[in-house]
Image (tube, rainbow, N blue to C red):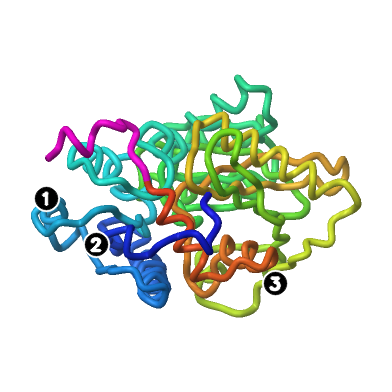
Amino acid sequence: MKEMGRIDAASLGKVAVLLGGRSAEREVSLMSGQGVLAALRSKGVDAHPFDPAERPMDDLRREGFARCFIALHGRYGEDGTVQGALELLGIPYTGPGVMASSVAMDKLMTKRIWLAEGLPTPAWRQVRSPAETRAAFEVLGSPMIVKPVREGSTIGLTKVTSADQCEAAYALAAGQDPMVMCEQFIAGDEVTCPVLGTGADARALPVIRIVAPDGNYDYQNKYFTDDTQYLVPCGLPEGEEAAIQALALAAYRALDCRGWARADVMIDAVSRKPWLLEINTSPGMTGHSLVPMSARATGLSYEDLCLGVLAAASLDNTEGAQAAV
């Protein structure tokens, strides 16, 4: 990522901040987008809000936008679909490309790739009915997490502690996505690690340890309360932060991410082994969000973080911009 002092805001051209969208995370995306918009404008960027739920994507080309900052979360924004549209339009965008975004949104595909790469991730089962959810509970044990495969922000997620909860947990997850998975629950420290950059130049930011009320880091405690504690420095035992940063980088590179992302990890309380849960390719940028919090610990302000991410906007197809003209 370019050094912030060397970024000429005027050279970035007319910028669209994509926000809102049609996913279940629309409310959070609107908060992220407004924060990014204000930050970019404060740095002299010609930035404008653009909600794909309200306008056709082709307006981006018609109105002369030179690049896009994707502040969309969840489906239709973080899953490769909007990235594909921008590839066709030839407009560079922030974050990972089409394939990386699509795979990272699909927790099953992500786990399969990580497993093939020898990276640790909790045991899981894909389920298609309440009966299969019960069968998974017998194998994975209690507690067990039931969640939609292609959703974020813990939406549709249930922590199951008894077999009689399986039917309701499956119904809640299936209401968000027809693909549902059960996952072994790892008891211990919950941490997250942002990554910035691409390829060999990618670097992990400081790890954040998350201490939620009663250990319940749900949608409400993520975005709308001040009861959750975020610890930076993380205060983990010596050597653990560096190990988690190395794991986050490996997870990021295994999916061929670029620009930025954030890896979520659980650390087993007994063995202290870290386990990868998922990776977010369009991280939140609200007042409660974790990437800006981690960046701030390195001396990187919210405004400079936004500017650096925007300056790194690119395309999978480097000839796309010329082809779309």
Give the crowd class for mark 2: few <14, some 14-19, many >=20 residues within 10 Å: some
Q: Kindly identify which residue carries mark 2.
A: 14
The residue positioned 76% from the left and 49% from the top of the image is 187
SS at circle 3: strand
Q: Kindly identify which residue carries mark 3.
A: 229
- The numbered mark, 3 or 1, whose residue comes first in the sequence reads 1
Give the crowd class for mark 3: few <14, some 14-19, many >=20 residues within 10 Å: few
C-alpha separation, residue under disc 3 versus residue under disc 1: 42 Å
Q: Considering only vertical position in the picture, is 14 above or below 112?
A: below
Q: Which residues are magenta?
A: 314-325
| Relative horizontal placement of residue 288, taking residue 275 as reference (left or right) | left
Q: Which residue of the protein is positioned furthest toward the right in this rendering?
A: 238
Q: Kindly identify which residue carries mark 1.
A: 58
The residue positioned 65% from the left and 62% from the top of the image is 294
SS at circle 1: loop
| Relative horizontal placement of residue 8, taking residue 289 as reference (left or right) | left
- Amino acid under label 3? Gln
Indicate the quadrant where residue 208 lies: bottom right
Q: Considering only vertical position in the picture, is 312 above or below 297?
A: above
| Relative horizontal placement of residue 138, taking residue 112 as reference (left or right) | right
